[in-house]
Structures are given as C-alpha cells and as structure tokens.
Image: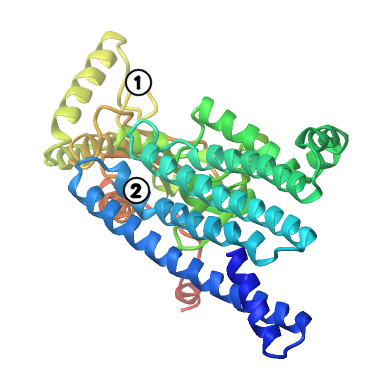
C-alpha cells in the first residue's frame, strides 16, 4: 500500500500537479477506497458468519445457539473484521505522518474495545435469556444482576479506553479511581441501593416476576413484569405501568398476593347489616317453616332437642320467653348461611368457612360471611361472590329479618303520603 501511494503521488507530480495537492488527493482517494473495502468486508463477514451459524443453530437441538443468533452476538463479532482491515492499512495511507498514524492506532484500539463491549453486553443478554428458561430461576431478578455486570464491565472498559486515549498506564486511572470513589458512590447511589435491595428481595423471596403486588404509596396494584437494578415494573389491572424503586420494597410496606395464587383460593369477607329491630325468638310457625328448608332441617331438629333437654334438666318455666334457651331468627339465619357455604361447590372447604356476628353499629348488626372461593380468576371470583350475596339478600326475609338501609327520598315520601 505504501508503494502504491508513493507511485500515485509521483505520477500526479509528473503530470504537473503540486506535490502537496497530489499527496492530499492520493491520501483521500485511498482513504475512501479502504473505507469501501471495509464496508465490503463487513457485508461479507456478516453474510458468511450469520448464514453459516444460523444454519447450524437451526439444525441443532440446543436452544442457546438460537439465542446467540437472536441477540445478534455473531453480528457484533462480524463487525470486528472490517475494523481490523481499515486500521491495518491506515498507517500505510498516512505514511510520513507519525502523529496521524499514532492517533489512528489509538482510534482503532478504541473502536475495537467498543465493539468488544457490544459483544460482551449481547452475550450477557443471551446468558440472561438462557437462565430465564429454567423454572427455578424464572422468577428471580436476573435483570438486576446482569445490569450490574454490564456496569462493572462498562467501567473497566471505559477506564481502558481512557488509558488508550491518554496514552497512560491503566493502573494510573485505577489509582485515580479511588480518589473519585466518593463522587461515584453519590452518582450511583440509586444503583447501589437497588442492587442491595435486589439481593435482599431474592434472598428472602419477597417478590418474583409474575407476583401480584399492591403498593398504595406508588399506586401500584398488579403483576410484577420486570425487576431491574433500580426499578420494579408493575403492570396494573387498568393496563398502566407503574415503576417503583427497587429499594422501596425493602424500606416500605407492600402486599404480595402470591399466597392466594399458591393456595388457589381467594378470600370472601363481606358483611350484610341486619336491622336489629327485626331480631326475635322463633315461634312454632317459624320453626315449622325452617324445618321445611332442606339444608336447615337437621340443624333445627338437633337444636330443638338440645334446647328442650337443657330446659327440662334446669326445670325452666318456658311460658315466659325470657326464660331458658330458645332459638332466634338471627341465629338460625347464621346457621343457614353456614350450611349454604358448606354446600357451595365454589367454596374451598379445606380453608376457614365461618358466618359470624360482628359488633353492632349505627347501621345495624353486621353478619359477615368469611370463606375462600376456589376460583382466583377475578371475573369468576366476583361472579361467585355476587351469587352468594344475591342469595343471602333474597333469603333473609324468609327468616323474618330486615336488611338495614339508610332512608331514601322514597321512604320520606311514603311517610308524607
């Protein structure tokens, strides 16, 4: 290349062109030529490497080679060939200019380092995808770890680039690195906190990708779709994305619904409010009516026998309703609801099933149904819960009970009329 350059310059000079301009034209022409050659080499190397490797990856049964192709690792490696070709011929093109040759050599090293960095980063992405395929690692914050690895590699290669550009030993910059470590810690504070939080979250198994989490402070209520070094992305039920700092899952409280998903059951805990003025002892007519309710009949007969035995043993005068033990319509109603829940096909009978009376309020007496639906899908769960309370509200009048409801305009109108 040096001989060709010299011959071309001499030819132009012999034609009457000034030596300076002859050298400038030849240098420019050779530079364009070598760039064109580098472009051709790039296309050829990519074509050969990608076509051959892609064909091998498709034939193989392993998945890792397919991921290497998908993440364009080989495409990045192919870019190294034209870089080497271009910078190999640059000293010959700029012959006689040692300063330019020196800077071109440094530039070539920097470009090769940057290309190598791209290759390493894409390789990290491939390793991350491979590890994500394992069931035991699928819900771990792998993204955080690989982001930290990229930062470390980036810092090391960045120092190496500075060493090349400044033409100083790399140890010089590592020595200076200690002096600015305090500043770097301040700059990368969120990254460091996020990394520590990621380790704690993984070690304590606090959150996983796919968990339903609720964090009211940040308005997050949905599935975790990504755990990064600095943030956790939550896809809310309204399809919006909330980004929460990773460290907040350590410093603040949040709710993780994973336990519900693992048990396959979702809690129902809702109350109806009974008007306390409608509560009374059961008379014979009411008891006979309750006996005709299929699921309630065994309870009524057993309860009557128990009460009769108690009153006889204590020789209680039952002519007064306040004496002895008696059945109430509210207690019978609670027993009916409990039997109803125990016979419901959508209620998990292995978990807690209770119907309880809570402390009276100004709105009446709360009767809470507490059970677990065996279908955790939101729409199905709401359907089951609604059906249960539709039935509860419809059957309450059969027990001579009234549901409390604040007076409406229609109520006052009836009074006026």
Q: Is residue 256 left or right of residue 314?
A: right
x, y (%) of residue 115?
A: 56, 53
Q: Is residue 56 left or right of residue 29?
A: left
* Residue for badge 1: 324
- The residue at 70%/37% (across/down) is 192
Provide the secondary structure element on which disc 1 rests.
Answer: loop
State the quadrant of the N terminus: bottom right
Vertical arrangement, residue 160 with respect to residue 379, above or below = above
Please tell me which residue lies in front, 369 or 206: 206
The quadrant in which residue 339 appears is: top left
x, y (%) of residue 94?
A: 70, 66
- The residue at 51%/52% (across/down) is 234
Furthest-front residue in this view: 14
Q: Are marks 2 and 1 in contact (CB under 8 Å)?
A: no
> How would you rate the neighbour count of disc 1 (Cα within 10 Å): few for under 14, some for 14-19, many for 20 or more?
some
Q: Marks 2 and 1, Cα distance to the nearest angstrom? A: 79 Å
Furthest-top residue in this view: 313
Vertical arrangement, residue 386 with respect to residue 238, above or below = above
Which mark, by number, is residue 67?
Answer: 2
Furthest-right residue in this view: 179
Nearest to N terminus: mark 2 or mark 1: 2
Provide the secondary structure element on which disc 2 rests.
Answer: helix
Q: Is residue 162 left or right of residue 277?
A: right
């Amino acid at each position: 290349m040096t001989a060709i350059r010299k011959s071309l310059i001499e030819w132009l000079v012999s034609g009457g062109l000034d030596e300076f301009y002859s050298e400038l034209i030849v240098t420019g022409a050779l530079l364009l030529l070598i760039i064109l050659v580098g472009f051709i080499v790039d296309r050829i190397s990519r074509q050969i490497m990608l076509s051959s490797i892609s064909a091998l990856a498709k034939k193989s049964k392993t998945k890792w080679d397919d991921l290497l192709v998908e993440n364009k690792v080989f495409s990045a490696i192919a870019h190294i060939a034209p870089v080497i070709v271009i910078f190999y011929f640059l000293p010959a093109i700029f012959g006689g200019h040692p300063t330019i040759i020196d800077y071109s050599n440094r530039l070539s090293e920097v470009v090769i380092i940057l290309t190598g960095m791209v290759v390493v980063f894409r390789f990290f992405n491939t390793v991350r995808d491979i590890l994500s395929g394992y069931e035991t690692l699928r819900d771990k914050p792998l993204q955080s770890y690989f982001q930290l690895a990229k930062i470390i590699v980036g810092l090391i290669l960045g120092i190496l680039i500075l060493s090349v550009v400044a033409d100083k030993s790399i140890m010089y910059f590592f020595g200076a690195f200690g002096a600015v470590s305090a500043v770097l810690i301040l700059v990368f504070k969120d990254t460091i906190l996020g990394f520590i939080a990621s380790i704690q979250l993984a070690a304590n198994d606090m959150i996983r990708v796919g968990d339903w989490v609720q964090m009211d402070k940040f308005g997050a209520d949905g599935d975790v779709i990504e755990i990064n070094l600095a943030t956790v992305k939550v896809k809310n039920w309204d399809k919006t994305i909330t980004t929460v700092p990773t460290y907040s899952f350590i410093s603040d409280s949040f709710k993780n619904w994973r336990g519900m998903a693992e048990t396959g059951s979702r809690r129902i805990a809702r109350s109806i409010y009974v008007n306390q003025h409608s509560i009374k002892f059961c008379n014979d007519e009411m008891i006979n009516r309750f006996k005709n309710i299929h699921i309630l009949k065994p309870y009524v007969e057993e309860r009557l026998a128990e009460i009769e035995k108690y009153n006889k043993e204590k020789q209680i005068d039952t002519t007064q309703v306040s004496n002895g033990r008696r059945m109430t319509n509210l207690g019978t109603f609670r027993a009916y609801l409990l039997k109803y829940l125990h016979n419901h096909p959508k209620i998990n009978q292995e978990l807690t099933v209770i119907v309880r009376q809570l402390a009276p309020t100004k709105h009446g007496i709360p009767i809470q149904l507490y059970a677990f639906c065996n279908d955790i899908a939101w729409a199905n769960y709401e359907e089951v819960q609604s059906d249960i309370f539709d039935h509860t509200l419809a059957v309450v009048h059969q027990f001579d009970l009234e549901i409390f409801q604040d007076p409406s305009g229609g109520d006052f109108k009836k009074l006026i009329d």
